[in-house]
């Protein structure tokens, strides 16, 4: 009996399995699509703006380093890259991100280069033949004859016993005449009537004029007129009559000198040089250059260089620098 139940149960299970065997198994198949797969878009990287400083290879290291440091500091403040080169060609203008070019002589052909790259701002320093316009900016005429002469007269009176100062200048030269008048005004600005302690039959400043046709080897004799006859202690040298031999000779006499051109080799007695401060001019021009403002004529303020601290002590130098600042701010008149 038990065996029959087992057989019956088995048959029942087989029958039930047969009833469900007719249902088909359904598998999900992906439906193809016509929508294309778009690859990710690559965004081009924009080059960091660049400034190039062009310096002559033979520039003295101290001056070269000063220019490089000045422009480097400006680029860092403005977020620009910085490069220094000794030459500049049309191929260099293709440098990615190039925005500003500052160049010293010799002229690499800035007029043509600027015309070929209107998106770049150029600053030409000491290129008399290059004029401002378009994307070219230049340092303007900055001789400021009267300001330099006034400051020379003020300084000479400040450091010279009895205010016995003089000037060497070219003859029949209107610029030199203006300089002489400003030199005398600067002396009076410092010392008023400027009466010497010892009696001299002359008033100061004394001056000598050198004819244009005069042999330069005779310039020392003109200096002797001031030094030996008029007992002058400091001489202001007009740039048109300066020679290395003259500077060296005056230096051997114990007389001081002030000029507007840096001597090739600084002689004894050289107090200081009054000349355009190109570094300050570059700093003044920089905001316009990086903002894309072209065609500027940048005036170079005057500054002091080649200072001998044993002749113009730090305290006296501060007085001279303050006077120069006041002159350039229009607070002091040169009398011209």
Image (cartoon, helix red, strand yellow):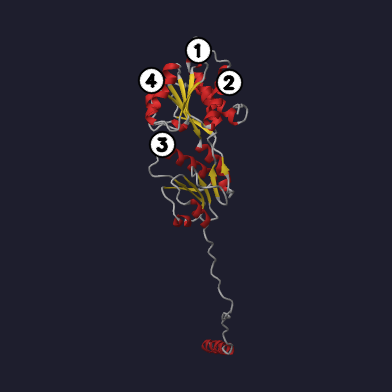
Residue 203: give x, y in percent of width and height. Answer: 53, 16
Residue displayed at 55% across by 35% down: 301
Q: Is residue 318 visible?
A: no
Give the CA separation, mark 1 to mark 2. 22 Å
Q: Could you tell which of marks 1 and 4 lies nearer the N-terminus?
A: 1
Left or right, 88 with respect to 297, comes to left
Q: Secondary structure at mark 3?
A: helix
Q: Secondary structure at mark 2?
A: helix
Give the CA separation, mark 3 to mark 1. 46 Å
Between tags 3 and 1, which lies in front? 1
Q: Which mark is residue 62?
A: 3
Tell me if residue 132 comes above or below residue 217 in the rendering: below
Q: Could you tell which of marks 3 and 1 lies nearer the N-terminus?
A: 3
For the residue carrying disc 2, how many other residues have a C-alpha within 10 Å: few (<14), some (14-19), or many (20+)?
Answer: some
Q: Which mark is residue 253?
A: 4
Q: Are marks 4 and 3 in contact (CB under 8 Å)?
A: no
Residue displayed at 42% across by 19% down: 227
Q: Which is nearer the eye, 76 or 176?
A: 176
Residue 1: give x, y in percent of width and height. Answer: 54, 89
Q: Could you tell which of marks 2 and 4 lies nearer the N-terminus?
A: 2
């Amino acid at each position: 009996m038990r065996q029959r139940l087992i057989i019956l149960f088995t048959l029942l299970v087989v029958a039930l399995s047969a009833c469900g065997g007719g249902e088909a198994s359904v598998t999900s198949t992906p439906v193809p699509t016509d929508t294309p797969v778009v690859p990710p878009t690559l965004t081009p990287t924009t080059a960091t703006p660049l400034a190039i400083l062009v310096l002559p290879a033979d520039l003295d290291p101290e001056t070269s380093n000063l220019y490089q440091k000045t422009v480097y500091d400006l680029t860092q403040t403005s977020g620009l890259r910085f490069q220094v080169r000794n030459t500049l060609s049309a191929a260099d203008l293709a440098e990615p991100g190039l925005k500003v070019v500052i160049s010293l002589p010799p002229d690499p052909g800035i007029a043509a280069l600027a015309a070929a790259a209107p998106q770049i701002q150029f600053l030409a320093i000491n290129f008399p033949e290059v004029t401002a316009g378009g994307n070219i900016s230049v340092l303007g005429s900055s001789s400021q004859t009267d300001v330099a002469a006034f400051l020379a007269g003020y300084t000479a009176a400040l450091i010279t016993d009895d205010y016995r100062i003089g000037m060497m200048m070219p003859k029949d030269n209107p610029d030199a005449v203006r300089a002489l008048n400003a030199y005398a005004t600067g002396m009076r600005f410092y010392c008023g009537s400027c009466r010497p302690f010892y009696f001299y039959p002359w008033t100061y400043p004394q001056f000598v004029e050198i004819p244009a046709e005069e042999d330069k080897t005779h310039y020392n004799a003109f200096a002797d007129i001031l030094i030996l006859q008029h007992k002058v202690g400091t001489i202001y040298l007009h740039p048109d009559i300066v020679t290395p031999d003259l500077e060296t000779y005056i230096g051997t006499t114990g007389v001081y000198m002030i000029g507007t051109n840096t001597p090739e080799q600084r002689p004894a007695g050289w107090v200081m040089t009054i000349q355009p401060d190109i570094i300050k001019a570059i700093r003044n021009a920089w905001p316009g250059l990086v903002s894309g403002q072209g065609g500027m004529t940048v005036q170079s303020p005057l500054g002091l260089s080649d200072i001998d601290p044993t002749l113009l002590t730090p305290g006296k130098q501060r007085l001279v620098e303050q006077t120069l600042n006041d002159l350039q701010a229009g607070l002091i008149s040169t009398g011209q």
